[in-house]
Each structure stands twice: as C-alpha cells, then as structure tokens.
Image (cartoon, rainbow, N blue to C red):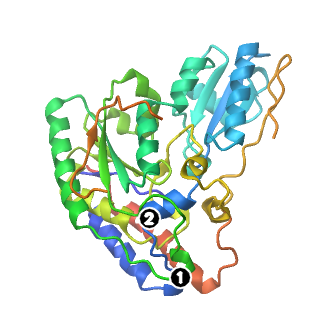
Amino acid sequence: MQPTSTRAGQHLLTVSQALTFAFAILGSTDPVAACNVPVFRYALEHWHPDNYRAVVFYQESLSESQQQLLADMQQQAAAYRMNLSLRLVDVAAIEQPTDKELLAATGATEFPLMVLQFPEALGIERPIWHGNLEEEPLRILVHSDVRRELLERLTDGQTAVWVLLESGDAAQDEAALTTLTDELLATQATLELPELTDSPEDALLDGPNLRIEFSILRLRRDDPAEQALISLLLAAEEDLVDLNEPMVFPVFGRGRAMLPLVGPGISASNIKGSAAFLAGACSCQVKELNPGFDLLFDADWQDILGWADSPEVAMANQGLGKNSKPVLVSIPSGSAEAVSDESAESVPTETTTPSSAPEAAEANKKPSQLLPLLIGLLLMGGIAILMMRRA
C-alpha cells in the first residue's frame, strides 16, 4: 500500500514521526532478517522497475510504420531497456469490460490510440496518458531530458534527486526551492549512513561510491517536452492535477518516485523525514512494502550500472510476480511479425534543460524472518491511514 502524499493541514503524524515509529518497531523484531544497506542503495541494486501497461486500440489493421513502431517498442521492452508492456485490442471486438471502460475514459474516437496505465502493482486502473501511434508522441512518452538527467545522477550514486515540479507562481516556487535547498544542505551534512556488517545481506555490489548526496531538478509544469513525465507524476493521486502549488517528488533507486510533498507540506520536518527514510537501513526488502512508484524510462539500468551479468540483481520484487518478462503480442496486418524473444557541501539545482549526455532473492526464508516484512506491511497501511489529506 502506498501512503498518501505529504501535505499541509491536519496530520496525526508527521512523515518523520511516522517513519521513525515504523523503523523502531521493525528494528525491535527479528534482527536476523535486518538489512543495513541504505534504502536508496538497496533499491538501486535490487528493485527492477515495474512495467507500465500500454494498450493499443486499433481498427482492423495498422500501417507499416505503426507496426514497426510497436515492434521496436516490444524489442526494447523484451530486452529490459524499457519498463513497458504492450497489448493490442481491436475496437470492433472488445471483450473485456475493463478495456471498454479504459477506452471510454479517454473520450477518444480516432484510432489507432495508445493508452498508458500505471503498473499493475499500484492498483490504479485509470488512464494516465493517451496519444496517437506516431513516432514523436511515443518518443516523448518514454524519453525526456529530465529523465535522462535523473538516470545519470542516480546511476552515479546520488541518494535521491528531488524533482521540484513548479506551480507557475514565481513566489511560491522560489519559496519552495529555498526551503528545499536549505534543508537538503543541512540534512546532507548531518545525516549518517547505517553501519554495514559482515552479513551477506549487507554486501554491496561493485558500483558507485556509497555516500549521502542530494540534488534538485526544477521542472516547469508547462514544458512541452516533459508533458508525458508530468502526466505520470500528477497521476499518482487523482487530485494532484487540480492543485496549483509546487510539488516535490524525491526520486531514488532505478527511477522510483516517492509521493509528493505539496505546497506548505514542503517543510523542513517532511524533507528531513523523507531523507532519513531514503538513507536509513532497508529494514523491509520487499519493494511493494516501501513507499513510491516507478517512473517510465527507456533505460537498461543493469547494463548502465555494469550489473547485467550479476545474478544478485535478478530479484524482481522478491518473487511477487509483478515484473515478469513482457509478453510479446502479434501485431495485426501485413508483414510485420511479433518480435522474438560526493560532496556534502552543495545541492546542485538544474533547470528542465539538462545536458543531453546521455531478482530471485532469498527464497525459503524462515517464518521468523518474515515477521518484519509482515509488520512492515501493517505499518505502511497504518501510516497511510494516519497521514490524512488536508481538509
């Protein structure tokens, strides 16, 4: 269960208090199952991004160019260079009621049409983006300069990149930036990483230097090149698109975003609490029991990090079955075939035009070792209820 975003208003617990409480309970349970690897690093090494679901609605057939676009996307998905699964539906023969509802929700009448949904693990069925089956819209859907910059910073080992989605109100945006910058500088200078032990669970893969380093990326809400990414961020909760306030999404691991701090919720205590969670020990290794949602990237994270041949990284969500290899579908019409199988003294801030440079985990755990995971699930659910939305 994902907790609600952190906003101003009546909270029974602050983020910091809630996470501290959760960690205290988890830490008091079976120490054998504990992991001292920081959350952000564990996520980078082990959490393969969930697949977004793309449904292509078409009438009778697809043109040769459209077939090739889909074939290329399927090939990238099959090679784990894009966390996307494709499914084709003939509008003249829709069988599933959910497909009818999905198409109706777009209001579209022209085809072919691609409709994007969040990964199944989130349990969110509403469409978050739809567009024509043309090269440019599909390119923007999976690729943008901000996502490329996120990829570079995260694979370089940064703890988290804090994406500031601006409201368009200069005063509000600058106030949010000042608060975020000041608190990240202070937190980065004082926050300490958990001490690693000789336990196999604390072993790190050969990768970026383990450190606490935060940075900020500013994202204009009206940037035409980033509208697909902005749609993903704002769709995380149903009412975000209606809020004219700055929002901060901490992004960590392999492009996993935490739900946002919004408006006055961009406070010192909330920033500190989120940062402490990310840099704290990964007490709960199951991905779905940790806050956040994966963004859509056209990137082979394991290859970029040099871990493509590492068996330790092959764990998609501890065997929860949400990240199986994409199923390749037949593309209708004609000749196209289905594709076969360091510094703690600065927090850099960037605009939305950064440089264009470029899972089989411990099975068969003892029942006692699963206790922290079960408690973590209950705690995350409790925190989601306690952190109520503002009135």
For the point 47% across and 85% down, which residue is it? 29
Q: Amino acid at mark 2?
A: Val
Would residue 6 be found to the left or right of residue 31 on screen?
Answer: left
> Taking 28 as reference, is 71 above or below it?
above
> Taking 114 as reference, is 192 above or below it?
below
Q: Nearer the viewer, residue 329 or 93?
A: 329
For the point 38% across and 31% down, which residue is it? 355
Looking at the rendered structure, the secondary structure element under dot 1 is loop
Label 1 Cα crowd, 10 Å radius (few <14 / some 14-19 / many 20+): few
Nearer the N terminus, badge 1 or badge 2?
2
For the point 45% across and 58% down, which residue is it? 208
Q: Could you say where residue 389 lies in the image, as x and y percent from the top left?
A: 31, 52
Residue 77: mark: none
> Taking 124 as reference, is 184 above or below it?
below
- Distance from disc 1 to disc 2, alpha carbons, whole Å, reads 17 Å
Return the residue at label 1: 199
Residue 326 placement: quadrant: top right
Label 2 Cα crowd, 10 Å radius (few <14 / some 14-19 / many 20+): many
